[in-house]
Image (cartoon, rainbow, N blue to C red):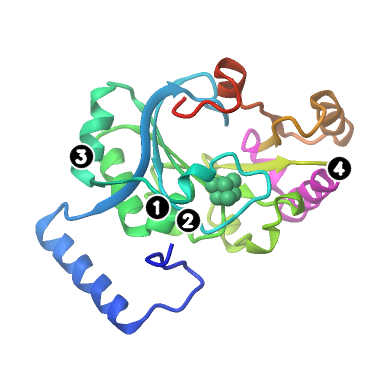
Amino acid sequence: MSNLVFENRPVSAPRRLNEQVTARLTDLHGCLEVMRITEIFHSIQGESSYAGRPCVFVRLTWCNLRCTWCDSEYTFTGGTEMSLDAVLEQVRKYNCPLVEITGGEPLVQKNECRELVRQLCEEGYEVLIETSGSLDINVLDPRAVRILDIKCPGSGEERRNRWENLDCLSQRDEIKFVILDRRDFDYAVEVIERYGLDRRDPAVLFSPVWGKIDLAQLAQWILETGLRARMQLQLHKYIWGPDTKGV
Ligand code: SF4
């Protein structure tokens, strides 16, 4: 992880210079980006308002958070370096109009992720980006749909929420709360009310932590509050089991 630079950490002068040179070279020559990829696969979208649709997933390696209930820890290390062109070529092979960029946290590789999203949008794909909400989403092409997590206390990462992100969401973007327990649910309701998020229906999603909360209980809480939120289950885990990767 030592070669990662997170948004809220100082960037050394040589690194900054290196980034500037790389950005300039990219401008001049097009595709110089190399990104670290954990997996690319074709499956059924399991979450969001796009659930149930065939989708190509591009899962980028690395994450700047460590949620207590994370089900993608295998993205924290490893992965394979791929050029942007190689990633695009792989995506095209599936002949599927819907693509999701996910992780880990895809915005840890900010420049590469931005360029990948831009290129996919240019090629006419419907592009979804799953992001933890801890980094600046403004860098992303507005043609893409941003699915933004708001971290609840049960994740152990709620202090990392970047609230400024809520100001730049469009009607097409979606906001997700992963709920571990009643405390998380109450936190989510408070955030929704404070920021008027339920007026963006169907953009607010409630997602139970797998195996940790009674689904009927969560449904009941949503009904009792009268929130215009969408309860979502991780469809892929019901189809293939909770521990199967690449689906
Ligand atoms: S942001 Fe996502 S990938 Fe990162 S630790 Fe949390 S759940 Fe895992």
Q: Name the kind of residue labelled 2 in the image.
A: Ile
In this view, the residue in front, 30 or 18, is: 18
Q: Is residue 149 rendered magenta in the image? A: no
- Quarter occupied by residue 59: top left
- Residue 159, above or below 182: below
Mark 2 near mark 3, Cβ–Cβ under 8 Å? no
- Quarter occupied by residue 107: bottom left
Please identify the dominant SS of the magenta region.
helix
In this view, the residue in front, 98 or 210, is: 210
Pointer 3 or 4: first along the chain = 3
Q: Residue placed farthest to the left in the image?
A: 29
In this view, the residue in front, 78 or 22, is: 78
Task: Tell us which disc is closer to us: 4 or 1.
Answer: 4
Element marked by disc 2: helix
Mark 3 near mark 4, Cβ–Cβ under 8 Å? no
Q: Residue at x 16, y 62 (%)?
A: 27
Which residue is the site of mark 4?
A: 182
Q: CA distance from mark 3 to mark 1?
A: 20 Å
Q: Name the kind of residue labelled 4 in the image.
A: Arg
Q: Residue at x 36, y 45 (%)?
A: 79
Which residue is the site of mark 1?
A: 140
Pointer 2 or 3: first along the chain = 3
Which residue is the site of mark 2?
A: 137
Which residue is the site of mark 3?
A: 86
Q: Residue placed farthest to the right in the image?
A: 224
Element marked by disc 3: helix
| Span shown in magenta | 183-204
Where residue 37 appears, x then y in whole percent? 34, 44
Mark 2 near mark 1, Cβ–Cβ under 8 Å? yes
Q: Residue placed farthest to the front in the image?
A: 78
